[in-house]
Amino acid sequence: MERTGCVVVGGGPAGMMLGLLLARAGVPVTVLEKHRDFLRDFRGDTVHASTIRLIDELGLGAGFRRLPQSRLNNVAVPVPGAGLVTLAAFDSLKPPYNYVAMMPQWDFLDFLASAAAAEPTFTLLMETEATGLEFDGGRVTGVRCRSAAGGAEQVLRAGVVVAADGRHSVLRQAAGMRAKEYPVPFDTWWFKIPRHPSEQGEVAGVVPSLGNRDAMIALNRTNYYQMGYLAPKGSDARIREGGLEQFRQRVAALRPDLADRVDSIRSLADLHWLDVRLNRLRRWYIDGFLCIGDAAHAMSPAGGVGINLAIQDAVAAAERLAPDLRRGQVRSSTLAAIQRRRRMPTVVVQTVQRIMHRMVFVPLFAGRLSGDMLAGKGSRASFSIQRMIFFILRHNPVVKRVLPRVIAIGPRPEHAPAFARPLTVAPPTKLGAMTSPTDTAVDTAAARARLLELIKELAVVRGKVILSSGAEADYYIDLRRITLHHEASKLVGQVMLALADDAGIDFECAGGLTMGADPVGTAVMHAAVDAGRTVDAFVVRKAQKSYGMGRQVEGPSVEGRNVLVLEDTSTTGGSALTAVEGVRKAGGNVVAVAVIVDRDTGAKEKIEAETGVPYLFAFGKDELGLD
C-alpha cells in the first residue's frame, strides 16, 4: 500500500496547478488522471490574465509564451447595422496583463505537467481512475484507484485527498457531499468545422452568433473551428430526433459564412453534449478531504471564467496546505480556511452568471431576444431592459473599465506562494532597471513574498493584548516593526503600489492618519518615484490644528486630487474613516482605502459602507497563520 503527502484526483487546470505548487513546496504529491493523455477537444481554451501573471510569478512565463497561442483582446457581439460591438476591451487593462490567451487546453496542461515533472516530489499517474475514498473512522485517509492496465483496485494513502475531478466528481459523491443546484437555461453541443487555408490567421476574438431560440460560438484551432451550439436545456433528444440535415441547417443559419462546409458534420454522433451545470457545495471539505474547482462549484460557460476560478482555488489551497503537509497533519481548520478564502469570488462569479442567465439566455431561448432586438429593431416595450443593459455595457465609462477586469482578472486573484517562486528571482531589495513588463511582475511577486516572510518573522506578537480599539486579542500585529524597518519599508511601498495598480486605482496622493500611516505613505511615494511616477505623500492629524495654518492634512495639497488613504492595519476602521473625513474636508477625492494587513474584524465592511470606496489589503490574517 503506497503513501504520499497529497493525492490530487483530476489532471485538469486546477489539479495540475495544485500538484505543481505543492511539489515546489517539497511536498510529495501524486496527481491521478483517468485518461491516457490531455488531448481532448471541447475543453475551455482560455488562460486569463491573472493566470498569466501567476505563471510569470512561477518563473514559467518565457516557456508559456512560446506555446502556440493568440490574444483575445476583447469580447464582442454582432449587432445588425453596427457590426461587431465590443463589450469588454481587455487592452484597457494595465499591460502586460491586458489580454486573455487563447490556446488548446491540452497544450496548457502538457506545459504544467512538464514543469511539475522537474520537481522530485511530483508524480503523475495517467490512465489511473479514482473509484472511491478510504476512511479511518470519520477521516479520509486515502483514495481507491484502478489502472487502465488492469489489476486489482489499489489504495493510495495520503495526508489529504483533493478532488479536482470536475462537475461529476466521483470523490465528492463518495464523500456524501451534495451541491446546491441553480437553474441553467441551456446546454452546449460541441463539434468541429474545417478551416480553409485562407482562414489560418490569428484568433481575433470569440464572437457569439445569436439566432432564434439558439446561439453559437466558434473557437479557432489550427485547421478547424471548435463550434459550440447553445440551445434550451433538455433539447438533446429533440435535436437528435430532428436529424442531421436539420442541425446542419441551424448551423448554416447562425453562421452563413460556414454554410459551405456543414457537410463535414457526418453524423449526430459528432455532437458532444455538455450538460451545463451551475452549483455549489455548502461545505467544500470533510476531515482529510477537499473539493476545488468544478468539484466544489460547477460554473456556467457564461463569461468563460470557470478555468480561471479553478486555478485560483488551487493556488489558495496550495498556500494553506503546504505548511500542514510539511508538519505531517492537515487540520480541518486549514481546509475551512481554504473555503473561506475562495467562497467570496465563487459567489460573486456565480451570481453574475445567474443574472446573465435570466437577462440574456432565458429571453434568447424563449425567442424574446436576438441581435436585431439589441439593435432596436424589435418591439421596444418588450425588450427595453435588455437594450438598456446593452447600452450601459457599451457606453458607461465605469462599466467599461470594470467589466474587462472582472473577466480577465476576476475577484480576489491569487499570487504565487513564496515557496513556489524560482530561486533565481533577484532579491527584491536590489531591484535593477526593468527590461520588460514581465520582469516587473516577477519582482513584485518576489517583493510580496519577502514582505510576508518579514511580517511573520518581525511583526506578529502572540499573547493577550488590548488593541487601540479597546478590543482584546490573543495576538498583535506590530506593523511599525515593518514600516520602519530598513529592508521591509521599501517592500511595503512596492507591494502597496502594485496592490492599487492591480485594482485599477489611479491616485496622485497617498497617506493617512498619523502615525501608523505616515511611513506607509512615504514608502508608496518613494516606490512611485522608483517606477518613474509622481505620487505625493501627506499626513492627516487626528484633529485640526488650532494654531498656525489650522490644517488637519499636512504636506502637499490634496485639493482636487485623487487620494489613496493608507493604514498599516485596521481593526474597526476608525483610523481610516477619520483620515477619509479629513481628506474630504480638505477637498481631496478619496478613491480607495488600502491597508497592509487586514485583521478580518469587520473593518472592510464598515469602511466600504460608510465611505463608498473600495477597501484593499495586501495580506489577510490567514496568510500570516492567524486564521
Image: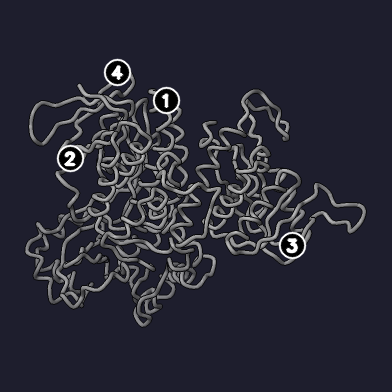
Task: Mark 4: give few (<14), some (14-19) or many (20+) Cα within 10 Å.
Answer: few
Percent across and percent down for residue 66 are 29, 60
Q: Measure the C-alpha gap from mark 3 to mark 2.
A: 60 Å
Callout 4: helix, strand or loop? strand
Q: Amino acid at mark 1?
A: Arg
Q: Residue at x 39, y 77 (%)?
A: 375
Question: Mark 4: which amino acid?
Answer: Asp
Q: Is residue 507 left or right of residue 209?
A: right
The span from disc 2 to disc 1 (Cα, nearest Å) is 29 Å
Residue at the far top in the pictured view: 137
Kindly identify which residue carries mark 4. Answer: 136
Numbered tag placed on residue 331 in the rendering: 1
Residue shown at the point (43%, 68%) measured from the top left:
89
Write down the quadrant of residue 154 in the picture: top left
Disc nearer the start of the sequence (3/2): 2
In terms of image quadrants, where is residue 527?
A: bottom right
- Residue 551: x, y in percent? 84, 56
Q: Position of residue 240 (x, y in %)?
A: 12, 58
Q: Going from the N terminus, do you reach mark 3 or mark 1 first?
A: 1
Where residue 184 sits: x, y (%)? 32, 52
Residue highlighted by disc 2: 126
Which residue is tagged 3? 558
Q: Is residue 81 above or below residue 311?
A: below
Quarter of the figure that contains the N terminus: top left
